Every structure is written in structure tokens, then in C-alpha cells.
Image (tube, rainbow, N blue to C red):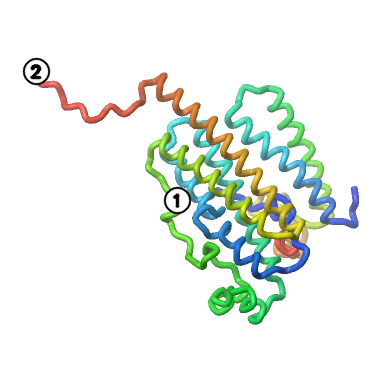
Amino acid sequence: MDYENPAGMLKKIQEMEFVAVELNLYLDTHPCDEEAVNDYNCAVEALKQLKKEYVACYGPLFNFGWGGHSQAPWQWAKGPWPWEL
Amino acid sequence: MWVYEKKLEHPVRVTCPDVKFAKMVITQYGGPDGELGASLRYINQRYSMPTDMAKAVLTDIGTEEMAHMEMIAALVYKLVDGAGPEDFKAAGWEGQWAQHGCGLFWTDANGVPWSAKYIACLGDPIADLTENMAAEQKARVTYEHLIAATCDPLAKATLRFLWQREVVHFQRFGETLNDVQEWMCNSKHMWHGYRPEEKE
């Protein structure tokens, strides 16, 4: 993992999350496709790992209790914000 | 409730600021076929959908459209980055500068503010799902117009991603429409009109 390059790490998350979004919409209308459910579950596991690594380096992706514990001082408000990257 | 994820769905980059192009892109923010209207249209229609599939598809596509609205906002933000009054005047977008500066506002490419008239909800699943399919096609065409109107390869890449999502959403709404029609057939949920009570 390229820890010096936040954009590179973020791109990997964006790619894997896109897989999850696409499979999610597909599964909404094809709920009995077991292979797609397995693929979705694989994407969930891969995303968990990627986000864990990203958050450890660059701070939380989620707030409101979804992103786990915060370091002190409060990390959420710290930029850059997504449109500034 | 909704949870915000502090990242864009897809990278948004531009080669250099281009106020004139921002004036066109803004229609996908607050225009008739833009992402604000799309997200509100779908999320709002959920309450009169008869099947779980339709409720899920509208929730998920409506949520993804909010992420697309954020991408369009980021694109406009980058296209006007560092621009001043002279740049806005040269681009023919001086009204934007006078009223909003470099801030974003919900308008179409002609400055017409966003209106709830852009979205529909008849409370009828067939009418509403076909409305959504038409909306996805109109957004697809708008993205094609925007892609044709810029030479910036980075801006084009962002718009192409959004363009192909319209195609996928159209497909999913079509499948949802088939499912709703089947549900209506199987369970005699067609509307048969007013039936007066039988007199003894």
C-alpha cells in the first residue's frame, strides 16, 4: 500500500466501493443470483481492509458513530474535504 | 437516516479552470435533468411503491444520485477555482458572480433556479417508474452534450463516469418496472374504478 499517496489509496477504495455499489443495484433486481451475492460479500471484505488502512493514515471516512473511535483532538473536521482533493 | 462518507464516489479533476464550461455543467447541479432533482425524485417516490424491490431500488439509486450531485458540485468548484469578476464577465456568467461569487447555486445553464416542477410523483408505480426511466435518458443526453462541449480530458473522464451511471440506472428501473407489472398481474392490484355498494 502506498502510504505516501492519499489519492492512490483513495482510488483503490473508490474502485472497490464502485464494485459494491454496482453489485448492490444489480442484486436489488436479481436477489437470487448467489454468485453475485458472493461477489458482493468479497467486495465488503476487501473494502473493510482498504478503509481500515486509509483511516489509520488519513483520518475518518465516517462520522455520527459509524467510523469507530476518534483520536483526540477530534479528527472528523480536519481537511482536506473531498472536493478539495 | 443518511450517513455521509468523506470521499467522492469517483475522482473529480480538471486540467485547468474553465468558467465558461462551469456555466454549462451547473445544469447537472440544479437543472431540470440534474442530480438534485434526480435524488429528490427517487427518494420521494419510495412511499407509494408497492414492492420491496421498488423501495430498495429507489433508496439506493436516490442515494447514489446524491453522491453524483456532490461530484458535479466538486467539478464546478474546480472549474471556477481562482476565477474573479473579469473571468466571469468573459465567460458570459457575470450574473453568477454578482449574486453568488464562486459559491454554488441550484440553477440550469441559463440561470433558471431549480424548481420542484422538475420532479414528479403521481403515487402510481407505473407512472413514476416510467418517469424515472425518461429522467435517466434525459440526464444521459445532457451528459453527452457536456462531454461534446469540452476538450479537457480530465473533465470528460468525470462526466463519462456520470454518463454511464445513467445507463445502468435506466436498466435497473426497467427491471423494477417489469417486477411491479408482474406483481400487479398476479395479485389483481389493478385499479378498477369506483364500485358502488350492492343494494340488497
Q: Where on the picture, by quarter, is residue B6? A: bottom right
| Residue type at the position of mark 1 | Ile
Q: Is B116 or B83 nearer to us in this picture?
A: B83
Whichever of labels 2 and 1 marks the residue nearer the N terminus, that label is 1
Q: How crowded is mark 1: few (under 14 residues within 10 Å), some or many (20 or more)?
A: many
Image quarter where the C terminus of chain B lies is top left
Tell me the CA gap for discs 2 and 1.
47 Å
Callout 2: chain: B
> In the image, residue B169 lies at what x, y percent?
59, 40
Rendered residue at 72%/42% (across/down): A18
Do the dots labelled 2 and 1 sit on one chain?
yes
Q: Is A56 or B114 nearer to us in this picture?
A: B114
Q: Name the residue under label 2.
A: B200
Task: Name the element at disc 2.
Answer: loop
Callout 1: chain: B
Evaluate whether residue B128 shows in this view.
Answer: yes
